[in-house]
Image: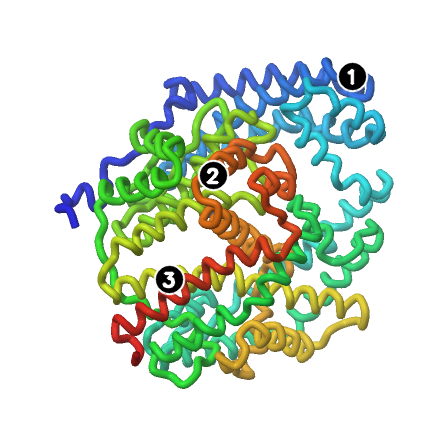
Amino acid sequence: MATTTDADLTAADVAWDLEPLVEGKGEAGVDALLDEADRVSASVAERRGTIADLDAAELSALMHEVASIGDLVGRAGSYAQLRFAVDTTDPTRGALLQRVEERATAINTKTLFLDLEWAALPDARVTELLADDRLAFCRHYLAAARRYRPHLLSEPEELVLTEKAVTGRSAWTRLFSELTSTIEVDLGGGRVSLEEALSQLTSPDRGERRDAAEAVTKALEPGLRTRAFVFNTLLADKAVDDRLREYPDWIASMNLANEASDESVQALVAAVQARYDIPQRWYALKARVLGLDRLTDYDRMASVADEESEFGWREARELVLDAYGSFSEELQAAAHRFFDKAWIDAPVRAGKRPGAFCAYTVPSQHPYVLLNWTGRRRDVLTLAHELGHGLHAYLARGQGIFHQTTPLTLAETASVFGETVTFGRLLDATADPSARFALLAESIEGQIATVFRQTAMNRFEDRVHTERREVGELSVGRFGELWYETQTEMLGDTVEITDGYRTWWSYIPHFIGTPGYVYAYAYGQLLALSVYRAYEERGAGFVPQYLELLRSGGSRTPDELGRIVGVDLADPRFWDGGLAIVEQQLEAAERAAVDAGRVPA
Ligand SMILES: [Zn+2]
């Protein structure tokens, strides 16, 4: 490894420059942008009540004004948010963010009528308008804005539902989150939060893991019937909602929100379920590494990756640039910009937001990447991942403000892809078997958590929603049975599930607040891996299509975007490709475990 200085290890000098967002005018620039946005939105507001009478040229002109509001507010908002993210303890930054949010809300309120009047237009008129190429820059956006239309009720009905939801669904959701956030776990002679107790499940000490799991089970016991009642109530509420809105099943409304076709979601779930042997094989290997005959549920998160090396920033940058370069010179050149033009903020600083993210900002500017660089191998992959988001945003900027961003289900296309290329090179450059095993173990556990666990949770949701509709209210015991069954489907007999684990469905907020949401994690991750698999199979000929996919941003539906790279999201065989990547990693981990002496040959 190259010699590295402390500054290089901590990436101390790698700070972003946000001033271009506000033309170098700092806070005053923010207010200038919002003043201008105010002016344009006032002009747009004069068109209230006229949307039905606009022709394509007039609508196009209006949408360009709306785009410019988005650009102005987006620049001001990005500046305030990103400036706050690097020092959340500075009150002036907090105050600026608050002021921008309040002003942005006021500005956006003035143009709300547009959505309503657009949604009210008859289909025939909309089809005629959208056929005009002057509206190409916002065509998909305008079409997607009307996708809920077939499921809308009359205006007075919608009004009643919206008002009553505050004391209905929202109140139940809030009650659930208040009930779970106050759960305390008796552990190690003290009381800790549920989250802290769950984090003990990664302990290398089996006794500590078992104690933590038993303490969590005990802590989940009080209030279990109440939480089950809340869940039952919300299951029934959704059943009523779906019936009134004429959705064919419990998941259809979520698919519509994600712009994912029902067929593609079914194909994803079927493909993942058919490969439950992958997590089972991993857990069998993990048992051997831990010296156990078989894992128990509380062993699954046990840390087995102990090896950790240090990476200097420059070394990481070269590795990631090389990885992108191995795929496409154009992507590498774009990636260079992030480093050369101060679009990245890397070091850990007091008061800085934890974690990592990429901010798209707006198409007229460029994306920014925030990291908390600590020089670990994991950080190299995070850099590659967030840079992937950045490159997607950068390449899609030509789509303009309405079409730059993809729906959630496609958001990981470039990030997971770039991370996978980088992972391969990192693995190739790692000779030490222990380090290889650590790298592979971390990756596989990430894939299992994102792809397999979320799919198993989706199967649980499917069972409880369906049973609530067909049979009626579910008992605490019945929730436990369905949780046990859907977990066992995934784990087979490689993991023993204790009786205590049967209640662990009862703290998961997604089931309550965003029913159906969890599959989106699996969808996004596996879609990216499957696209990567298509690249492995097709080689260099795939690259131009892939870049075209990235440039297309969110200008079409996911199924249509998939066709750009010649894949069919409704075909389970497409999703098999991503699963094959995970299987390859598993096989490599099995070999590395033997080479590293972690298991007998
Ligand atoms: Zn991501």
Q: How many numbered discs sit on the rendered protein?
A: 3
Q: Secondary structure at mark 1?
A: loop
Residue at (31%, 71%) from the top-left corner?
Answer: 593
Residue drawn 44% across the image and 69% down it: 198
Q: Is mark 3 within 8 Å of ligand 1?
A: no
CB of mark 2 near ligand 1 (< 8 Å) = no
Q: Is residue 147 left or right of residue 22?
A: right
- The image shows residue 29, relative to residue 533, as above or below, that is above
Q: Would you say the beta carbon of the disc 1 residue lies within 8 angstroms of ligand 1?
A: no
* Quarter placement of the C terminus: bottom left
Q: Which residue is mark 1?
A: 54
What colour scheme does the image use?
A: rainbow
> Is any part of residue 239 visible from this angle?
yes
| Amino acid type at mark 3 | Glu
Label 3 vs label 2, nearer the camera: 2
User: Residue 496's x, y, as percent?
Assistant: 50, 82
Task: Using the image, tell me which numbered label, if any, was put on residue 26.
Answer: none
Mark 2 lies on a secondary structure that is helix
Of the numbered discs 3 and 2, the one sitting upstream in the chain is: 3
**Whole-percent x, y for residue 512 in the image:** 64, 60
Which residue is tagged 3?
Answer: 442
N-terminal-most mark, 2 or 1: 1
In front here: 308 or 96?
308
- Quadrant of the image occupied by residue 293: bottom left
Of 412 and 54, which appears nearest the observer?
412
Measured in 3D between alpha carbons, the distance from the residue under mark 3 to the one under mark 1, in whole angstroms, is 56 Å
> How busy is the neighbourhood of tag 2: few (under 14 within 10 Å), some, or many (20 plus)?
few
Note whether 82 is above or below 207 in the view shown. Answer: above
Query: From mark 2 to mark 1, how far is it between C-alphas?
Result: 45 Å
- Point out residue 532 in the picture as x, y percentages from the top left corner: 47, 48
Circle 2 is placed at which residue position? 541
